Amino acid sequence: MAAEGKAIARVDDMVVFVPYVAPGDVVDLQVKRKKHHYAEAEAVKFHTYSPLRAVPFCQHYGVCGGCKWQILPYEEQIKYKQKQVTDNLTRIGKIELPDISPILGSKKTQCYRNKLEYTFSNKRWLTAEEVKQEVTYEQMNAVGFHIPTAFDKVLAIEKCWLQDDISNRIRNAIRDYAYAHDYSFQNLRTHEGMLRNLIVRTSTTGELMVILVCKIETEEQMERYRELLQYVAETFPEITSLLYIINNKVNDTITDLEVHTFRGNDHIYEEMEGLRFKVGPKSFYQTNSEQAYELYKVARHFAGLTGNELVYDLYTGTGTIANFVARQARQVVGIEYVPEAIEDAKVNSAINGITNTLFYAGDMKDLLTDEFIQEHGRPDVIITDPPRAGMHQDVVDVILRAEPQRIVYVSCNPATQARDLQLLDPKYRVTAVQPVDMFPHTHHVENVVRLERRS
């Protein structure tokens, strides 16, 4: 198994990357793209199936583009994720490492996500089998997921295994109501059509948020919008937060749009170790709630807090980690780019009676400066959880000058993490590595590293 969850075949001196196959499969390949030393191909015929292979459980497997590793038993998946972390840290980082701890697998391998977003489209993606039938389909509207190779087409999803089944029932009910009452689905090229997006958020507290996003240009359309929302509210009384957004823009982002409450609250709550976290329609929260708790416990353990430390939490998001470790620290200072997330972080501190946190919004490389550290104090511990691109060089430089005793680096991309560890290596040595699987049936893996200042 290799990058992006593809498997490797070797043909002469050519490396060939192939999706949707398992190590040990014997196949005929059709080359799709060829470069000097590698090619990308797809399997067109299977001669022998690998003994490692599992039977995919999803009817949309291989077309949807998600959950590519369903063909591998879960114990094999986490074995390859462990190898991915090891390879990245050794080959890219090229630094001295301790023994890497065995990966923490996810107890749930199905229905583990707390958030899914669906797209409405008037151009349904036809599978290869449907195209071969050479028939005219009356219904070309669809609600589901974007096809990776065709931005304007959507695969109609009947059952997705990523979220609790309530998500499937809500999506299919809205779809059937829209079909029966002739609601228009958006054209992703011209941006015409009423129905645009559906977001479903669940929580470990049993609360349920549904956000329906539509394009509304007339009062008549608004009235029909209300009728659809009323139908959803009456059909699914378990929804605790039914929200709607009017989006007349050409893009699907909702961060700059007003959210309206149709029924219930404008938020739901997550709980973790007695702490409550308010989750709004635009809030970021780790999408695997139960495994996020395991991840945060590792980060807190690596931080080695005694109650006397000043902690900086970089890329704090809605302050989940900051608030999670605050009771074991003297003070926690959180920094995040998104102002709305920082407001959520402050609310989460207030909800839980936490008074020793400070939160600041701004670009990390501009906000985290020597002057900022001089004003707020030199941190004893830095926890950093950057985006996939890793940390900016300026941020690394400030951390090196700040010289905290320990750094806890949480990463969703071990490759960029390895690059950053190499930059920190002159002053810090890696003393612990703990991979954590947050996304079963995908190649993605989280990794937590503890660094300690060299004497």
Image: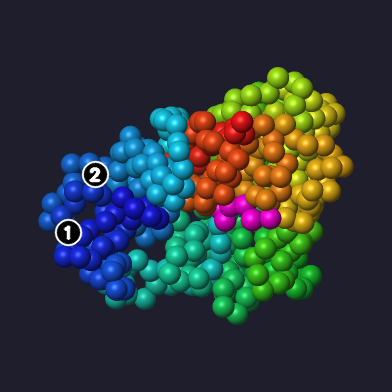
- Image disc number at residue 53: 2
- Nearer to the camera, 183 or 328: 328
Question: Does residue 154 appear to the left or right of 174 in the view shown?
Answer: left
Q: CA separation, marks 2 and 1?
A: 14 Å
Q: Residue at coordinates 40% horizontally, 41% vertically from top-left?
A: 86
In the rendered image, is residue 280 in sight?
no
User: Magenta part of the protein: which range?
Assistant: 387-394
Q: Residue at coordinates 85% horizontally, 29% vertically from top-left?
A: 355
Residue type indicated by callout 2: Arg
Q: Residue at coordinates 67% horizontally, 44% vertically from top-left?
A: 400
Coloured how?
Answer: rainbow
Among all residues in the image, which is located at the extreme left?
Answer: 47
Q: Which of pointers 2 and 1 lies earlier in the amino acid sequence? A: 1
Q: Position of residue 375 (x, y in %)?
A: 87, 42
Q: Position of residue 379 (x, y in %)?
A: 75, 35
Question: Does residue 182 appear to the left or right of 268 in the view shown?
Answer: left
Which image quadrant for residue 441?
A: top left
The residue carrying pointer 1 sits among few (fewer than 14), some (14 to 19) or many (20 or more) residues within 10 Å by Cα, namely: some
Among all residues in the image, which is located at the extreme top?
Answer: 306
- Nearer to the camera, 142 or 119: 119
Among all residues in the image, which is located at the extreme bottom?
Answer: 190
Q: Circle 1 sits on which residue?
A: 27
- Image quadrant for the C terminus? top right
Residue type indicated by callout 1: Val
In the rendered image, is residue 372 in sight?
yes
